[in-house]
Image (cartoon, helix red, strand yellow):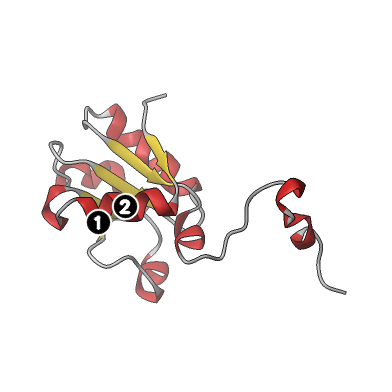
Amino acid sequence: MPEFTDLSPVQARAFLAAHGSDAFTLLDVRQDWEYAELHIPGARHIPLPELAERVGELDRDKPVLAYCRSGGRSSAAAGFPAGQGFGRVLNLAGGMSAWSGQAVSGGPDLGLDFFAGAAG
């Protein structure tokens, strides 16, 4: 599988802050309605099913940071340009859910077992 790098939301925010908006492509691969509902400002919207036919719209010389709702679709999306010879391809791990602070991850040692079940 082509290589790309997963970034946490903290790492992704640092990446965006360290680079000018014209130095990379922020790629939202969610559906139209998801993008309309909420997206990261400056994102280029290409839904995952359209990526193969629209990859030519992306600049191969710029890093690509892909994201979706939870990280699954963007992981698949990140693999595509990585396999097409793009230099640096990144994936927002956890997607918009993590970016917006809605995702919880970690084990019981972090006290997150409290979130494991539904409220009664």
For this view, does 78 lie left or right of residue 113? left
The quarter of the picture where the N terminus appears is: top left
Amino acid type indicated by mark 2: Ala
Q: Position of residue 44 (x, y in %)?
A: 24, 58
Asked if the residues shown at circle 1 and circle 2 are in contact, with their CB atoms under 8 angstroms apart, the answer is yes
Q: Position of residue 53 (x, y in %)?
A: 24, 44
Q: Residues within 10 Å of mark 1 (few under 14, many from 20)?
A: few
Q: Position of residue 17 (x, y in %)?
A: 24, 56
The quarter of the picture where the C terminus appears is: bottom right
The residue lying at 11 percent from left, 54 percent from top is 22
Label 1: which residue?
Answer: 17
Image quarter of residue 82:
top left
Q: Position of residue 38 (x, y in %)?
A: 39, 72
For residue 96, above or below residue 8: below
The residue lying at 50 percent from left, 52 percent from top is 94
Which residue is most to the right? 120
- Say what secondary structure mark 1 lies in: helix
Calculate the distance from the C-alpha at mark 1 to the C-alpha at mark 2.
Answer: 5 Å
For this view, does 4 lie left or right of residue 87? right
Amino acid type indicated by mark 1: Ala
Label 2: which residue?
Answer: 14
- Say what secondary structure mark 2 lies in: helix
The residue lying at 71 percent from left, 46 percent from top is 107
Q: How many marks?
A: 2
Mark drawn on residue 63: none
Q: Residues within 10 Å of mark 2 (few under 14, many from 20)?
A: few
Q: Report the front residue among 70 and 36.
A: 70
